[in-house]
Image (spheres, helix red, strand yellow):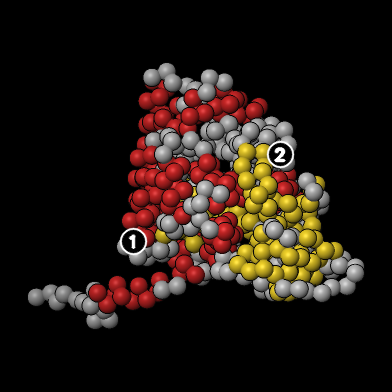
Amino acid sequence: DAVQFCDAGYGYGDFACQNSPVSLPRILLRGGTVVNAHHMEMADVYIQDGIIVAVKPNIVVDDDVTVIDATGKFVMPGGIDPHAHLAMDFMGTQTIDDFFSGQAAALAGGTTMHMDFVLPINGNLSAGFEAYKEKAKISCMDYGFHMAVTKWDDEVSHDMEVMVKENGINSFKFFLAYKGSFMVSDELFLEGLKKCKSLGALAMVHAENGDAIVEGQKRMIELGITGPEGHPLSRPPVLEGEATARAIRLAGFVNTPLYVVHVMSSDAMEEIAKARKSGQKVIGEVVSAGLALDDTKVWDPDFITAAKFVMSPPVRAPGHDKALQGALSTGILQLVATDHCTFNSTQKAFGIDDFRKIPNGVNGLEERMHVVWDTMVESGKISVTDFVRVTSTECAKIFNIYPKKGAILAGSDADVIILDPKASVKITAATHHSRSDTNVYDGRTGKGKILVTIAGGRIVWQNGELKVTPGTGKYIKMQPFGYAFEGIDRKDAEYLKSLGAPVKRSRALS
Ligand code: URP
Ligand code: ZN
Ligand code: ZN
Ligand code: ZN
């Protein structure tokens, strides 16, 4: 096996062993407003050997240090996208963006790390992990892995342990949709929740009722609705609300934290709000498509225009977007992902006669930071510090890599962006960096331009130019028992106490 797995200190590894000393530039970001989730200040940022060395006003440096003027701009932690699918085999094809092109696009949009979902091969976790290690060798930015669990036996249970204890994975995704491929039963989901709890791994859920979706699809076909609009019509918000409620209740029953991925409807969001109000540890992720798009384009008479908006759960009717924005601004939802899962027009056309065959997924890696800035900060819904929290810091905390990631602090990785709040951005398929020929945000304009991206101490995006090298991205190992697990054991003790433990109850036969 040519692939080596080298560790370089705490929670940190690199499949391609690129972390050996290479000459990284010394960089000073001068005169900007440094924004962290907890605090905002005028300060310079000095970077050396891929690490932030100092954050304070008026740093004096040698002449050979690269100085970037950030006056009037925001200097922020690079975005972390908790949810993307690069080089994923899905619905009979593979996503058009791989670990290089998807990450290059991300870097041009101010995201410096993403987390991808390792898919098992025929249910086998280890085989899936090996395959994703290969796919990720061309990475040009840091990345982490979640892993999907799609079947259950002793080997899967054991492999989950190996993934957590040896391979740096601290979260597992369970699909309640995609019947016949990824979907799991409640029985499997319960086994998975118990195992996650024992390992300190976060259970993630794709919450839509897969059985009801098959029924909904049958109805559409019987009505003669075969176009892209059949997709949202066959899987309405009620099916997302039902599965979200079920997943939350089962996680509550096991008493383990739950992370609901891609919340797309107010139905699902309200279930999360209710659970959080009751004190249950439920995390809600919204995606940029959920914040900024609605289903009107799915009715476009042009197939390709309509099909590019097909994702699961679907983009919803107007109104859900506003509800999700509100939930993000009030803390009901905690962070923003992309679910970047791109297919080009040729691939989308697999479903020309049948919406069930349109590969599901939309773009977002390059657009997320700008979309969040524009819909949330520019509109006055969240503060600049909240922007950093929902695009970076919260993700780093949830997946236990903070403050190595998600902060501009001395000692943090040099993943830093400069954002100009006054400059406008226009998104077009012709100018984006994804390999796809379409973009769901095509033609969209707004504020919040990423002027500079520094990833791992390298200036990779500046003056509209991208300079990226395959193999420079590192695998970031994530330790179990992140902060969502705090207090879980005390809640277990409380539960046992409520049953009268430690008194063993018995019934005498008489
Ligand atoms: O449509 C989507 N979301 N495709 C990616 C797979 C998933 O469910 O996350
Ligand atoms: Zn074991
Ligand atoms: Zn999903
Ligand atoms: Zn996804």
Q: Nearer the viewer, residue 181 or 321?
A: 321
Q: Residue at x 44, y 58 (%)?
A: 331
- Residue 210: horizontal and vertical position, in percent? 41, 40
Using the numbered discs, state the Cα–Cα distance from disc 2 to disc 1 in whole angstroms: 41 Å
- Residue 333: horizontal and vertical position, in percent? 45, 55
Q: Residue at x 80, y 48 (%)?
A: 463
- In terms of sequence position, does the residue under pointer 2 or pointer 1 come before the other? 1
- Residue 261: horizontal and vertical position, in percent? 49, 51
Per the image, label 1 sits on a secondary structure element best described as helix
* Numbered badge on residue 277: 1
Per the image, label 2 sits on a secondary structure element best described as loop
Identity, as a three-letter code, of the amino acid under mark 2: His
Is residue 100 left or right of 62 when viewed as pictured? Answer: left
Is residue 389 left or right of 485 when viewed as pictured? Answer: right
Q: Nearer the viewer, residue 424 or 175?
A: 424
Is residue 148 left or right of 471 when viewed as pictured? Answer: left
Residue highlighted by disc 2: 432
